Amino acid sequence: MSARGFSVGALVAAALVGCLSAGEAPMPPMEQAAVADRFVEMEVAKAEEAPPPPASAAPMDGAMGGARREAASRPSPAPVDARVANDEPAPDDDGDRGEQAARSWFPESFLWQPRLVTGDDGVAELDVAVPDSLTTWRVLALAHDRAGQQAGTVQQFQGTLPLYVDPVVPGWLYAGDRLLLPVQVVNTTADPLTARLDVEATGALSGSGVASVHLGAAGSDVRRVPLEAESAGVARISARLAGGDAQDAAEREIPVTPAGRPVEKTRAGTLAARRSFTLAPPDAADPRTDRLDVTVFPAPLALLQLELERLQSGARPTDPAYGFALAGQMGVLSSALGVDVDPDAMRRLKLLAWQRAAAYILSPDPNRAADLLASLRLEHDQPQVVEAVPLLAQRLLDAQRADGTWSRTGRSTLQQVLVQTAWSARALPEEEHGAVLRASAAVERNAADIRDGYTAAVVLASGLADGGLQEELLKRVRAGIGADPDTGEARVEPRDTVLNPWGVRPSRAEVLAFTVLALPAGDEARGDLAAALLRSWSPITGFGAGPADVVALEAVASALGSIDGPVTVTLLRDGDEVASGTLDPQQPGVAAVLSAEAHGDDSEFTVAASPELPGLAFVATRRSWVPWTDADRLAGVDLAVDTSRLRAGEPGTLTIEASAPAGVSLRIEQGLPSGVLVDDDAVRAVAQLGGTLEVRTDRVILTTRAFQPLEAQSFAIPVTPTFAGRFQTSPLLVAPSGAQAVPHRPIAWTVAP
């Protein structure tokens, strides 16, 4: 079997005719009589990962010899001559090999063939390109015939070379990091040899090394090359190895992230005409890492698709039935655009929402009933939901007071009663006309006391005002719309004394959403406010409007337009085009992203669409990094993080010590350098101290128990670093219970070789 363009006929034949080999438990085999029209599903992925290089690897600092390392021969099922994978002529080719082409394609899996038809003999052939990884590949083949009889097998083959080089690279670095890069060289032949190793870093990394290595039969050696990340960007590692008639080359890339405190400034708007703006960089921003990204949405469906992905990744919205609202809005938009949404994704979304909301739906209090009904307004397919809506509506109707109002608490201000009444009336099904009319009369009696734009917007969005009252409330809403003095972006700020239906000060996203729904369709400010709402969305927190997220969904879906033909969008800096893209009406869920260097100055940027379309929204984000200062800390909280005495390849300890005011618990997000492994017992060890620990690829998230007076809590988290050097991480985020996280200066990890 050759590595590039190989035939899997023998493999599939082994799976279907010979059944299984070497200890694999077979699935029920096919009867030999039913051979024709067999179908095969195949998947090829890495069978195993090579362990990290040992900590005792020799450094590589020029032309120096290293300690000789002997390696046991590895099992090699079906070896592959990787010279074919690197476009090197086979030994019997007449061409001149020349310099070895560098291996640079290293995916973890590379083949998924869901339907492959065999011949009458049960054999199928498939030509594929095998990646450049020198590893053992696992091939899973599953087969069945038209009668439903099944067979399957797992086979392996190995990619190898007589002599090869393998730079072991981290997944990411930060600007300023220093790395001792392990480079492994392996001799798979039965003869000892001496080889020359050349390693060079370019791009965001600098450093190089040359060494002569002596390898015994089936031996290996590891050298370490000192490298430094001088700036952000993409770093490229090139390693070449030549010994005798054998040679190999490999290239790897490492993303290097800017260091410092990230600062973002944003601007949003619509593209009914060309939009020009400036976003001044923060003081001391690094011009090498200063960038502007502009996202243009072809339809609200693009944002809703991102919100779906956020929920699928495990986000838990405040409203347990929120998934029904998202599915309903996506269904309405997709039908209007004539495009399909994934029915399986919609089914899973609704199933998860029902699992979260069932307990509340079956035994709701009136306040919860209003919130649930707001999310279930567009759901007409789920039988259990259809049956639950009358129950929820009745609970809400029973709570309406004799004067037509609703109040969530026994003691509320008139302003609270008005927004709570508007929210409850808006949530009721359309057929409940009587309750809505009583609520409308209550609002009209108290209209003179509606003095702020937010309360006026909530009443208007509920449909409880018409005629002259509607015009008066619209004046109050428009009076509350202003412009940001720095960016010129449309904004709405509620009064400090204003509370929302849930008894707290409304978030910026909530105010924007209700204002958008309050304004008539032709209002000039409506599109820009919806675009500002679009800007407030985050892949981590969504809209951040809590139970009003459902209102934000509706506002975006109703206020932003869609395209009916291709649209070219262009980004200009000081009049010169720097990026462009095309919006496709056949892909309304795919946004265009335009990026440009901002250069750390006050350049004027312009976003243009051709043709110009009202309601086509854009969000511009300028990302800069500034040096950390001692002011970047949370008042009242003391934090100490210790990563001393760490060595590459050896178990060590990450220690986090914290103190905070009595009664407060802390959520601490501590970044991890690439390759740092957290021990499996860490979660249990933290739990024994009263905290919780969540482990992710690039960070650990520690939540403490509530602090006692004058108490300090300490947590020892066992970790094992893979790479030696000096590394930075993402910002250290600290959030007291119920508050927003505050970024702190991250510590530098020093790992000895």
Image: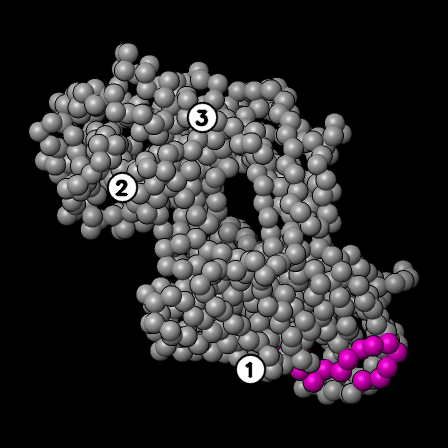
Label 1 Cα crowd, 10 Å radius (few <14 / some 14-19 / many 20+): some
Tell me, for residue 651, which label it has, or none. Answer: 1
Q: Secondary structure at mark 3?
A: strand
* Mark pair 3, 2: CA separation: 23 Å
Numbered badge on residue 317 = none
Residue in the image at 70% along x and 66% along y: 177
Task: Please tell me how crowded label 2 is: few (under 14), some (14-19), or many (20+) other residues with Cα within 10 Å.
Answer: some
Q: Which residue is mark 2?
A: 502
Secondary structure beneath label 2 = loop
The amino acid beneath tag 2 is: Trp
- Of residue 237 and residue 339, the one placed in the foreground of this image is 237
For image coordinates 15% across by 36% down, the residue present is 396
What residue range appears in magenta?
Answer: 52-66
Examine the rendering and report whether any part of residue 336 can be seen. no
Disc 1 and disc 3 in contact, CB within 8 angstroms: no
Figure coloring? one colour
